[in-house]
Structures are given as C-alpha cells and as structure tokens.
Amino acid sequence: MPVRVFLILLLTAGLAAAAPASRDFSPDDLAKAATERAVLALHGDVARLPIGGGLTIGDLLLRTGASKQFHATLALRAEQIGGPRWIDEKTCQVQIQIHGQDLAKLVLQTAMANPRRSPLAWQQIDAAADTWRKDTFTATGSISSVNPIVVVPKVRLTGAWEQVSPQQRQAALAAARASAIQRIVDSVRLIPLSGGRTMGDALAVEAVKNEVERYLATRPIDHIDFQDNLQVQVSLAIDEGEFFDLVEAALRRHDASHVPADDREWARVRQAFAAKVARPIGQAPALAMTPAPQTLVPRQSPDWVMGHLESEGSARDAQSKLKAGRAAENDARAQLRAKLVGLPLGRTTLGEAARQDPRIEQAIDRALSRARLIKTTYLAPASATARVDLDLRDLWEELRR
C-alpha cells in the first residue's frame, strides 16, 4: 500500500496561528502542539486530492463552507502512529495517518450534508475517490521548546475574508511574513561597522545572508490580524538579543576582516542595533494574490454560446465493467476538454486564455462537471464507451461568474 508522507512547514492559513509562550512547557503541552501541527499538515495535503471534474477536496470544502467542520472531524479520525517521538530533549515530533477509505467516507459525508452547495454529486466523488481510496496519508508535526510555540484559538474570519480562498490566504500570509523579514533587515542596514562598511554590506555576504535568512524564515508567527480592508498583518516572534547574537556570530565567521575588532566596538554596534531594529511586523493585501482582472472574457457572448458539444470516450478494466464505464466517462470528459480549449474567445482561444488566467481554467473545470452523461455502452471483455454532452450556455455562465 503506497504511503504519502508530508512534512509541515507552515501553519495552514485561517485554521490556526502560533503564539510565543514561556519556556517551561510540559512534555504534554509540546506533544499536543505537535499533534495539531500534524493535523494542519494532513488537512492541507489531502485538500489537493482530486474528486472529479478537475476539482479537489479543497474546492469542495470551499464551495460548501465546511472546512472547519472537516478539520475538526479529521482531527478525530486520524490515528497517531506510536507515541510522541522526542528528537532531543527539547524537540517533540508526532506522526498521524488516515486511511484513504476513511477519508473517502469523510469527504462523501461532507458532500451529502451540503447537496445544494456541493459542486459534484456524491456519486461522482465516490467514483473519483477510487484513485486514492486505497492509499494511506501520513503527516508529521514537530515543535521545539527552544522557540516555544503553542496553538492558540482558531482565527475567526469575517466579512470579505470569508470569500478569500485558503490558497489566497496562505499567499497573503507568506507575503506579509516576507514583508516583516524585509522590514527588520532594512532597519539595520545603515549601522556602521568598520572600514567604512555598514551592516548592509555585511548582510550582502552570501554566507552571512544565508544564515540570517535561515534564522528569520524559521521564526514563528505570534500574531495574525485579518483586517476588514483585505490586508493581513503578521508579527514574528523574534527576540532582538538572540537575533543580534546570531548576526554577530555569522559576521565573525564569514566577514571577520570588516567587523569591529574589540568588545567595546561590538558593544557600540549592539547598542545601535537595539536602537534601530524595527519590530518584525509585515503586511500584505489579499487582492495582490488574486488572479488578474477578467479582461480576456469579452462582454458580448460568442457565437457558440447557444450550441452543444458532444464527446465520446472509451476504456477497459479487466476487474469490473462498472469501473470501465467510469473510466470511459472520464475519458469522454477529457476529450470534451480538448474540444473546448479550441473555441474562440474574443481575439484568442479558450485554451490560450486559460493559460493566461487561472480563473478561466477553473471555469472550464466547473463547466465540465456540469456535462451530462448521455449513454454508457458496456462491451466485452470488460470495456465500455461513454458519450457526454455540454450545453455551452453552462460554459458561458461559468466564464462570466
């Protein structure tokens, strides 16, 4: 049985945040935080699994608004593999897993509980789940008391943020984090060192730069503010004294000829550093992560909008005629997509427009999910053909959304 292993790097946006805490965490506290990180990793990775029609579990959760309930249920159904593993006396690691069969049940329950908002019928999702139903999905979460982090209550998204996809929230958080890092580095660039050089010159040395970037990139987020104007602001948990110690050590190792020669001069640099270093706060807009305006879709409907497109697919499956029929339907939809991308759209084609604008690609996927299965013919031995039909008004509706 194939096992897919995923390692969490960042907390999933909108589900949880990290906060600094005292350094006297108990082992149970760290194990609990590592477990939640593993659940967040598992949630993020299974969200990319296909459910048919070019859609994913993540798309289903977004359409149905069931992401929070799915996460809570996933946390209950996932199994811990062994006990917490202590990499060293300060670092705890927890590994969890969920079997594809159990995940499929959870996904189907989500679709059946929200039939009007689900983009696909549960039968379609059930068929598509066969591609991963026999897999086992594993996630690992780890945490260290050196830079203690605990999971705090989930971030409540309101107003305009409720309409922003999880992927866009993650992108906004990543941009805000990068902004915070850039702000703190820029704030100390002009501090003089020796020989006419500045801290900025030293930070440009590749080895120094790598050490500093590696340190800043691993600092946890200790505060997230999703603002009503679709700006997100984050604050990083950075100890200024610890940060200076790391910078000083990197300079001594890699740029010793251009740094202060004695402790008195280093004390001056430390004092200037403490006075200049900015608070590690960054901000970024969600709108910057949205696709470009939909200028490629013309206002006037194209000539093909009142027509239909049909396509036929075929497949073989030695184990089951039913599986052969499902595979033939999927092949028919793939053939239908090949026809759709050639349709004219303004001065270009639908396929070329989709390559330039991800939303057009998503509109095609939604339209294909609305294509109607006309007929499935089962042939011997264990093969089938299927015909599907798409009302092109459905495609135009999706493009104009």
Image (spheres, rainbow, N blue to C red):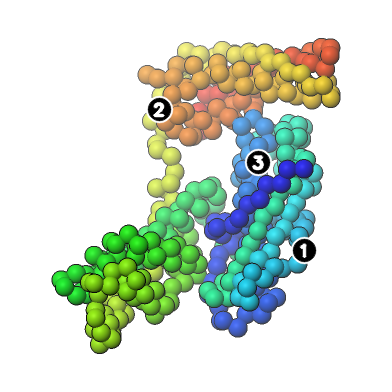
Q: Is residue 132 above or below residue 313?
A: below
Q: Position of residue 40 (x, y in %)?
A: 63, 57
Q: Position of residue 66 (x, y in %)?
A: 67, 49
On screen, residue 269 versus residue 131, left or right, reads left
Residue occupied by mark 1:
82
Image depth: mark 3 or mark 2 in front:
3
Q: Residue at x 19, y 69 (%)?
A: 197
Q: Residue at x 27, y 67 (%)?
A: 202
Alpha carbon distance from label 1 to label 3:
26 Å
Crowding at mark 2 (Cα within 10 Å: few <14, some 14-19, many 20+)? many
Using the image as rendered, state which of residue 129 and residue 200 is in the foreground: 200
Residue occupied by mark 3:
49
Q: Which mark is residue 296?
A: 2
Using the image as rendered, state which of residue 257 and residue 336 is in the foreground: 257
Label 3 amino acid? Leu
Q: Earlier in the sequence, mark 1 or mark 3?
A: 3
Q: Is residue 88 visible?
A: yes
Alpha carbon distance from label 1 to label 2:
53 Å
On screen, residue 306 versus residue 31, left or right, reads left
Q: Is residue 10 above or below residue 390?
A: below
Label 1 amino acid? Gly
On screen, residue 105 versus residue 64, left or right, reads right
Using the image as rendered, state which of residue 63 and residue 1 is in the foreground: 1
Q: In which quadrant will I find the N terminus?
A: top right
Q: Earlier in the sequence, mark 3 or mark 2?
A: 3
Q: Residue at x 67, y 71 (%)?
A: 86
Q: Secondary structure at mark 1?
A: loop
Q: Residue at x 70, y 52 (%)?
A: 138
